[in-house]
Amino acid sequence: MADRERQALIVVTSAYDDLGLGALRAPTDDAEELAEVLADPDIGSFEVEVLTDPDSQRLRTKVEDFFADRTPRHTLLLHFSCHGVKNAAGKLFLATTDTRRNRLASTAVPAEYVSGTMLASRAQRAVVLLDCCYAGAFERGMFPRAGADAHVQESFQDLERTGGRRGRAVFTASSAVQYAFEEDRPVTGADPPEERRPSLFTGSLVKGLRSGDADRDGDGEIGMSELADYVSDRLTELTPHQTPQLWLFGAHGGDVTIARTRPRAPTAVALPTGLDSAVHAAGREERLWAVEDLGTLLRGDDVGLALSARTALAGLTHDDSRRVSQGAEQALRTAHPRVATDFVDLGTVTAGTPGPQTLLALEGPPIVHATVEAAPRVPWLRATRVAEGVQVSAEVAEPGHYEADVLVRTATGELPVHVGVDAVPARRPRRWVQRPAARPVRATPGREPSVRKTPVQAPAPPPAPGPATEEPRPPGPKTSERKPPEPAAAVEAPPRRARAARPGAALLCSAFVLNLLALVTPIVTSDYDAVFAHTIVTGPGWLVVIALWAGLATTGVLGALALRRSALPFRTPVLGWLACVTAATMAAAGFIYSALSESIDYFAPSAGTVALTLAWMVELWCCITVWRRRQTASPTPPRQG
């Protein structure tokens, strides 16, 4: 997945209105391949946009938008594949589709404009790649991409002011007096446009990034210096007439990292001739000096030489001289991998779920980190190699305490590390079930409330013969104990119902009053008479009458029950009926509004209309209130006794 803080813009211009600027074959194909490798999450992880054949104004706007409104966390890469031309003063311009060589100031984009927008950007890293020619002289019938004195470095000289916190890089396809090549032919205006030929510069960029060969030091990251060295070496093999140029400005640490690759396994390289001769020398003193030099190489930054030094020291441990063998063993021990602790506690994880990763930091020279491998000895343990050491995590299926070993292997030795973890069962999500309120027990005059009989236990077996003990009491006849009825005054409604009754009763009674007003007051008035709701008996007017009477009866009954703190208004079936009545009242109000809107010149709203509007609004609020305090209806349990 692409990183939103890594943005790339690829500008390709292959067609030009000016006949003196020949059509280019490579840019479109090169842009597709470069966009693919830059967008690869394992390589560039850029969000890539390709801009094809823009005019000068569009390119200016796009370049400014690309560098503007960035944060210090952004990494930006801008690639141009086009003609480069210069004016009489030797200033470099990037050609667009509408560029005219005799009107460069208004029809082309100066390199200084790109430099200024790059300098103003707050992005931490910004790179410009120019796949253009900067040749000065040209033969008759050949139209070069640029003149002889296109001063690239001067165009970007202001970037020196960026300091060490922000890195800037400009990488060009050729020097100021060279052509850029498409396959084996220089790019000129006289070339026929039918045949497609890849650009050597962009093609080398893609190959170096995709294969990982541009990672010269094998650290898994590709900087602009490494990429420039790779491209220069490759172009030297392909053609001796093209020399790429790199300028770094304000690069923190001396390089600008733009991509990454998987760390490759280092390979041993040959030892220097003098040191190799000393290892196999006949004199003991020479071999002792060789042991010291080999120990220095073993702990050095060059992993290839360190591997060769390790092999040579391993052979010298069997030397005839005790001093030489002991010195070789001591040198090897200094490069042995080390950890701060021999036990790693992964903490508590949930069974069946991958746990968090814990870093097992390794100590030792670069050869340790470059050749580290981790081999868990149990399937529930996971180990991943990282730059600092090994990331360890656990994924167990069952709860319990687990312990196992992780074997850390390097070129200089092995190191077992003990790992422990506690797994707990997964928690099931709690389901909140709203229980119905307890039904109050009311005393009925002349009749005792029924209670559940207490089951009679079976008689206990007689005790075994032995010392005198208390004889068990013989079981009595089956009886049923009855609890005295509670007085009616002591029975109270549950607190939940009491709280719900107050607002519910008030709203229902308000809806009852509003429905009554809508029935007995005029709904609309005209120039001649007032129209009452109960007089509308034709057509859809019946809906108004039925809705008002249904709302009047429903809210009146439910309001009276709520005042008595009854649970009936808060049952789900009753709520459904109240919702239907509310919908009917809203439909009746809609019919009245429609009639008023069609004949507004003759009819005007009156008190009944206002009452009807408030009625359906209050009924709707009643539905919401009752829904929030609803109770699931359940049948009355059968009596026992």
Image (cartoon, rainbow, N blue to C red):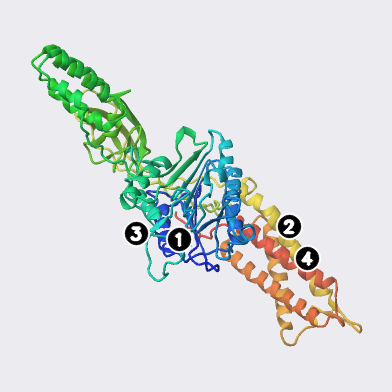
Name the N-terminal-most of marks 1 and 3.
1
Checking the image for residue 184, the label placed there is 3
Q: Are marks 3 and 2 in contact (CB under 8 Å)?
A: no
Q: Is residue 288 above or below residue 530?
A: above
Q: Would you say 434 lies left or right of 312 here?
A: right
Q: In 3D space, how far apart are the residues under numbered discs 4 and 2 (Cα atoms)?
A: 11 Å
Q: Are marks 1 and 2 in contact (CB under 8 Å)?
A: no
Give the class, few, some or many, for how many residues have Cα within 10 Å of label 2's Cα (few <14, many ≥20): some
Q: Which residue is mark 1?
A: 139
Name the residue at the left extreme.
320
**Nearer to us: label 1 or label 3:** 1
Image location (x, y in percent) of residue 258: 44, 44
Name the N-terminal-most of marks 4 and 1.
1
Q: Which residue is mark 2?
A: 506
Q: Is residue 525 above or below residue 510?
A: below
| Mark 2 residue type | Ala
**Which quarter shows the C terminus?**
bottom left
Q: Is residue 199 visible?
A: yes
Q: Which residue is mark 4?
A: 513
Q: In 3D space, how far apart are the residues under numbered discs 1 and 3 (Cα atoms)?
A: 18 Å
Give the class, few, some or many, for how many residues have Cα within 10 Å of label 3's Cα (few <14, many ≥20): few
Mark 2, secondary structure of its residue: helix
Report the number of discs.
Answer: 4
Name the N-terminal-most of marks 3 and 2.
3
| Mark 4 residue type | Val
Name the residue at the front extreme.
140
